[in-house]
Amino acid sequence: MSDLLALGASGVRAYQTALDVVGENIANANVAGYSRRTAVITENPSAGSGYPLIRQTAAGNGVNVSSIARAYDAFLAEDARLAGGDYARAEARQYWLSEIQSFLNTDTQGLSGRMTAFYNAAQDVAADPTSLSARDAFVAAAGEVAAQFRGLAQSFDNVRIGIKQDVDQTVGRINDITNSLSTLNASMRRTAAGTSQAASIADERDRLLNELASLTRIDVTTRADGTVDVRLDNSNGPMLLDQMGPKLLGATEANGRIQLTLDPFGNSGLIAVPSSGVLAGLADAYTQNADSSRAIDTLAQQFVTSVNAAHGQGVDLNGVPGGDLFAASSLAATPSRTNTGQATIQMEVTDESLVFAGGYELRYDGGTSQWTLSRNDGSASISGTGSLDLDGIHLELGGAPKGGDWFNLEGITGAAGMRVLVSDGAEIAAAAPWSANIAAANQGTGTVAVRSNPAAAALPAPIPASFTIRMGAGNTYEIIDTTDIADPPTVLASGPWTPGAWIPVNGFDVQISGAAQEGDSFVVAPTTAGMADNANMQRMIDTRLGNPGFESRYTREVTRVATSLNDTQALASATKAVRDKALEARDSASAVNLDEEAADLIRFQQAYQASAKIIAAAREIFQTILDIR
């Protein structure tokens, strides 16, 4: 009788546990990372004969729940982690490339449009060199080009800062996850295998591993006790987590690249960013941003160099030689993070050549209410209130500073440092420094042109103010001083003449083309103030015609970013599809199927009820026996 009771009791206990497991599966069916549990029901071993303290039974010893099995496929789980990491990389890269693309545009408000407006304004000056309104419009167009370059530089810097912040946050989360995994490893070692607690720890472990794989590529080794070792990138990568604990991950930036440090307080050195995960996508975007920023800096430098070289060869409306139209460097005042006041600073560089390359420090003394501007090496300084002047730098100071507030003044170059140096349209050097005229008495049809050539030095000192090129017999020429009234005048230089060839003079070359005859003369004189000459403006316009031109170079960079973004969008779409299929395959092996659980619920409920009836039958039989007595 006791055997029948024991059999029923074992069944009730076993199927009650099985029902509990089914109930837990149903309750957690929609919980992310939950793996289906199964109660493993096995027959209790029968007691055999030959052991004096064990009673031999004929009906067996019932059933027992030997363990709680967790549905898990290591291969599918690893495949899902890899696919998720690939998609996370493409998604992170796509986001930041979209940010870069948003401020790189080729419309009229973009850099390409501003440069087009600049050259169009130059055409207007060339059409009417004495028009002050056209000249002022040209200066304004130049300012818009410089402002657009600076705006692009600021946008690239903002993206760089944003990506680096995301990198730091991602690295911080990676460190948090490895610390949590280390804690779970310790819990797993203390937990009996085949229990619901062990399954719950394994679920949390796998959830963290999935998140970690979405942040950076990892290689996971699962030990027999359920604990894990994690390496970066692949099975040969550096160890991120082992049985001793996690290694601290760090990130650094250098030369436009993101690199990682593992255990930065040890001697690990720099390691490359693994090939998948959010961290890889951020590193890709950081590199693209740095490359595009360098391309715009190079474009700015080339534009400034070309335009300045042309502008410097001419003279302005006042007859003054032209200087640089643009500067490719400037100073920027960066406040200290410890500042508590609200100071205002207006800075102007009045003489670029005097600025100290080592930078400056501007500090406010609350006790004396004075500012001190000093070179960083301490070799010169000046103190005062209101305004300060040092090394060609003029500062206007105001606002409400507090004692101890200070600013660092550093030089910035490239697109960020670009600015216009000319504010008055009359100072635009549109005219060539020399003008050439054909003598009225010439018998031939020769024409004359002049170009600047600082290397030309064909005349001995003293150099006259103006020259006459006189054609001699047998295709020769002579250069004489136009003001020389001697008969014959002194010949300063002479040589053979070939039509169309450039004749060096002094700081410029003269070209005589066509059919010039012996005795024809051409007068070359300095351009006078107010002359309607556009030769040098035409030279500035010619800087547009590179191979490709400046607008085309910018458009090429925009196209390069757009192409990379399009490729990334296509990759994100493809990797998302792969990830979704991998997740579907993983979940088919480990996720809860409510239809199956409903069937198990009925099956175990019936088994539980049947076991309970066994106990009831045993009780009835026992009661019957008692009644007989």
Image (cartoon, rainbow, N blue to C red):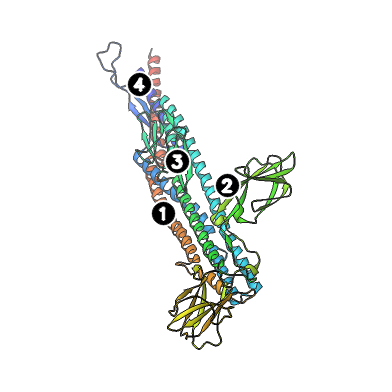
* CB contact under 8 Å: marks 1 and 3: no
Q: Earlier in the sequence, mark 2 or mark 4?
A: 4
Q: Earlier in the sequence, mark 2 or mark 3?
A: 3
Q: Which residue is mark 4?
A: 4
State whether residue 472 is above or below residue 379: below
Q: Which residue is mark 2?
A: 358
* CB contact under 8 Å: marks 4 and 1: no
Residue 557, position as x, y percentages in the image:
47, 60
Q: Earlier in the sequence, mark 4 or mark 3?
A: 4
Question: In the structure shown, which secondary structural element does the residue marked by tag 1 occupy?
Answer: helix
Q: Residue at image x 51%, y 71%?
A: 459
Q: Which residue is mark 3?
A: 260
Q: Amino acid at mark 1?
A: Leu
Which residue ends up furthest to the front in the rendered image?
A: 487
Q: Residues within 10 Å of mark 4 (few under 14, many from 20)?
A: some
Q: Amino acid at mark 3?
A: Leu
Q: Which residue is mark 1?
A: 571
The alpha-carbon separation of the residues under discs 4 and 1 comes to 66 Å
Question: In the structure shown, which secondary structural element does the residue marked by tag 3 occupy?
Answer: strand
The alpha-carbon separation of the residues under discs 1 and 2 comes to 46 Å
Q: Earlier in the sequence, mark 1 or mark 3?
A: 3
Residue 341, position as x, y percentages in the image:
70, 43
State whether residue 462 is above or below residue 370: below
Question: In the structure shown, which secondary structural element does the residue marked by tag 4 occupy?
Answer: helix
The alpha-carbon separation of the residues under discs 2 and 4 comes to 96 Å
Residue 210, position as x, y percentages in the image:
43, 40
Q: Amino acid at mark 4?
A: Leu
Left or right of 99 on screen, residue 600? left
Q: Amino acid at mark 2?
A: Gly
Residue 194, position as x, y percentages in the image:
38, 28
Q: Residues within 10 Å of mark 3 (few under 14, many from 20)?
A: many
